[in-house]
Image (tube, rainbow, N blue to C red):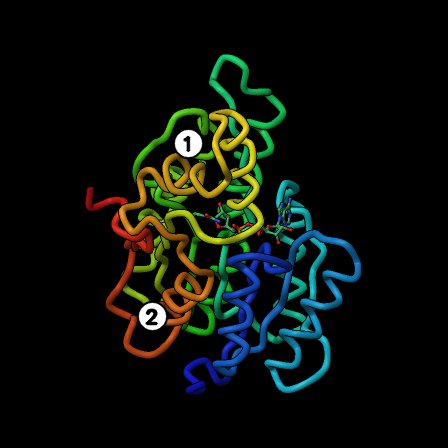
Amino acid sequence: MEQTLAGRTALITGSTSGIGHGIAMQMARAGAKVMLNGFGKPEEIAAARAEVGAAMGGGDAPYSAADMSKPDEVRAMVADCEKTLGACDILVNNAGIQFVSPVEEFPDAKWDAIIAINLSSNFHAIKAALPGMRKRNWGRVVNIASAHGLVASPYKVAYVAAKHGVVGMTKVVALEVAQTPITCNAICPGFVRTPLAEAQVKPLAEKHGVSEEVALRDYLLEKQPSKRWIEVDEVASMALWLCGPGSGGVNGAALSVDGGWLAA
Ligand code: NAD
């Protein structure tokens, strides 16, 4: 792969699995030094560190166990990245969780957790990382929002509120850095083939009394005109492009990678 990120350092939250892991792999292959973050079984974290480390040329990738629901840990993670890798040139706010329920039954604790992890952690990480980016006069913030940052679906009140918030935050930060070589953009994926999304198929099949194949096509992907999963690498390549050469004119955008969802 072309070394478009040679000499850059990247901190990617929620990169032990799914989209974050895919972004970490593509950025490592493109020459960046990457710090991972996220939960998982010790052997899963070790495997992710080894895999991304190998893509960086050997050894384990650095890793922060910071919990994105805790502002102090988010700040410490950014400081750890700056200390370990020498800088945080690229910040990818990707960690996220989902919970599905009607508003009236939506548990308060789930609302608080989704707002903290999917929305507030982005604020705390950006606030901590921007001073270093300004000092070095270069930076990239990529927020992994969602099609649900632009349009709503029922039963996802906290997720949709958080992701709309991420898109709004992206625009504010973009305006504040607009006259510097720093950019801040959001990627808005449709349904991507990851554990978070795949876990929604079985309950839908049971609810509607249909096979998982039908539940995927007719219910989960109801709004995704392509009728297929977006692949992790299709989101990761957008994140990679936003951090590589030639992307400096794109700032404050909410870029859809959704199989046509927003076009319908
Ligand atoms: P995933 O469950 O595979 O990965 C989520 C990552 O976040 C994991 O590494 C997990 O350990 C980490 N994480 C969760 N809570 C955390 C916490 N408190 N602190 C630190 N890390 C934590 O999910 P994914 O599908 O890869 O989702 C990644 C992002 O993409 C999320 O923000 C999600 O909302 C967004 N997204 C996903 C889809 C999709 O269809 N999969 C679509 C649009 C947007």
Q: Please state which of residues 227 and 163 is positioned toward the viewer in this rendering.
A: 227
Under mark 2, the amino acid is Pro
Q: CA distance from mark 2 to mark 1?
A: 30 Å
Q: Quadrant of the N terminus?
A: bottom left
Q: Please state which of residues 31 and 200 is positioned toward the viewer in this rendering.
A: 200
Residue 241 picture location, percent across and down: 36, 71
Residue 119 picture location, percent across and down: 49, 41
Proximity of marks 2 and 1: CB atoms separated by less than 8 Å: no
Under mark 1, the amino acid is Ala
Closest to the camera, between mark 2 and mark 1, is 1
Badge 2 marks a residue whose secondary structure is loop
Label 2 crowd bin: few (<14), some (14–19), many (20+), radius 10 Å: some
- The label number, if any, that marks residue 181 in the structure image: 2
Give me the residue at 59% from left, 20% from top.
Answer: 107
Q: Along the polypeptide, which appears first: circle 2 or circle 1?
A: 1
Q: Quadrant of the C terminus?
A: top left
Residue beneath disc 1? 161
Position of residue 186 in the picture relative to residue 246 (left or right): right
